[in-house]
Amino acid sequence: MARRALHRTPIQHGTRVRGRVLARLAKLLAATVVVIAVSGGSVAAIATWELASKVGHGTHLLHLAGSKNLTEIPDVSAIAGGVNLLLAGTDTRTGQGGAYSTKTELAGSSGAGNNDVTMLLHIAENHQSMSVISFPRDLMVAVPTCPNAAGGTTPSTRRAMLNTTLERGGLPCVVLTIEKLTGLQIPFAAEISFDGVIAMSNAVGGVTVCLATPVNDLYTTPPLHLAAGQQTLLGEEALSFVRSRHGVGDGSDLGRISNQQVFMSALARKVENGSVLSNPFLLYPLANAAVTNMVLSDTLTNPTTLVQIALALKNTGLANMVFLQYPTVADPNDPNRVIPLGTAAKAVNAALVADRPLQLSGLPGRAAGLAPGVATPTPVAASPTAAAKPGASAKPGSSAAPGSQASVPVTPDTTGNVVLPSTVTGQTADEQTCTHGFNGK
């Protein structure tokens, strides 16, 4: 299906739920640490270990049998095999200071907060493709038994909003829930708060995004008033942009996800195209901003692991980096909630478990469209030698989790890619997209 340049859709659900966001793409954290670690001599080594001293002990993902903190320092090379890394963005006001320290703000969310952003980074086993799947905060899911802060467990439930899982059982509970939903095993995880988004946007000198129409949102802190055109976003303004729901698309959380993908793809292009990677004075502040504002699983607290993950991405290329929204449909029991969209969700799960590169055929999303005059890039074929066979099931020791979708057959095209149904929205990192302001309908 041809990708259209502009896209708008009416509100269907989720417009009454006030949102708070955002998490950051693991590519940026990992890529910057890589360059610091391998770009030369003792200065790089000192910088890397200074970052390591700020990471802390990390959160243990208890459900991973035999997992442990990686304390040995292996040779720096790309991590073997694929990577599944979960990113959770908390909306907590605790410890954020400034405008978020008011009584009203703290009443809205404090403590662990909600994971209003949940993203899964999947790097293929052959390192030729990468995908970032955004899961809507309003997605109704089955939540397994989760550990809690008191040392006990929180009982499972057949139906709960995804964004409640962080408060239910911390980062491990978010991981367990996404594993149950997708069928993947996820050994790496990170959590980021508002401060981290501000610090990282400042560290790269701002992110330039395209706005097809003005974006105005009085519900963010600070309020947004952005004119149409190219806008470079820094600090709190960048945070407000990625948090904005009322100001973009149809005012729904699904519109906000596509707006975040506009921002993330622009950020990925800035890092990949050299303005960041070639400048050591930007690299260290970016890596520093990431590790000092994140809670990492203990499988990530060794800086060499971050380096190895980043090296897996060094030759992937922007055209093979896919951002997509997990496919959903309005919940028949509540129009302000969503549930997985049967066939499309199973197709995404099966392709991920089979470790196939993903190819989009749908539109960018509710709040985004391809920039005028920009042609849709031709997907770059991944190496067929390292891909799974058509219809393959997960093998022992693979990334599939118990009860997964591994037995669902997937049918790749001649390039080895799995072409997803047009109901799956998103974009690749090299697609130039623009955000549409709230259409008022």
Image (spheres, grey):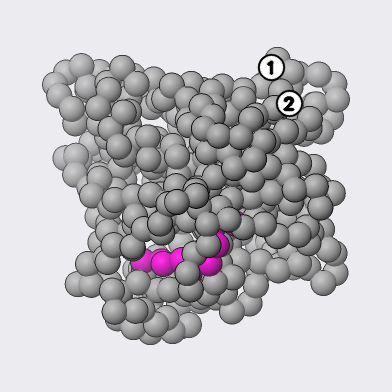
Q: Position of residue 155 (x, y in %)?
A: 73, 59
Quarter of the figure with residue 211 = top right
Secondary-structure class at tag 1: loop
Q: Is residue 300 left or right of residue 244?
A: left
Mark 1 or mark 2, earlier in chain: 1
Q: Which residues are magenta?
A: 357-365
Q: CA distance from mark 1 to mark 2?
A: 17 Å
Q: Does residue 434 appear left or right of residue 309 in this picture? A: right
- Residue nearest the viewer, comparing 81 with 365: 365
Establish if 394 lies above or below 208: below
- Residue behind mark 2: 223
Badge 1 is on which residue? 97
Magenta span: predominant SS is loop
Residue 231, disc: none
* Tag 1 and tag 2, C-beta contact below 8 Å: no
Q: Residue at x 25, y 27 (%)?
A: 278
The amino acid type, in three-letter code, at marker 1 is: Gly
Q: Amino acid at mark 2?
A: Pro
Using the image, determine if residue 218 lies above or below residue 179. Answer: above
- Answer yes or no: is residue 138 visible: yes
Question: Which one is nearer the viewer's eye here, 266 or 411?
Answer: 266
Residue 424 located left or right of residue 413: right
Residue 198 percent location from the top left of the image: 56, 24
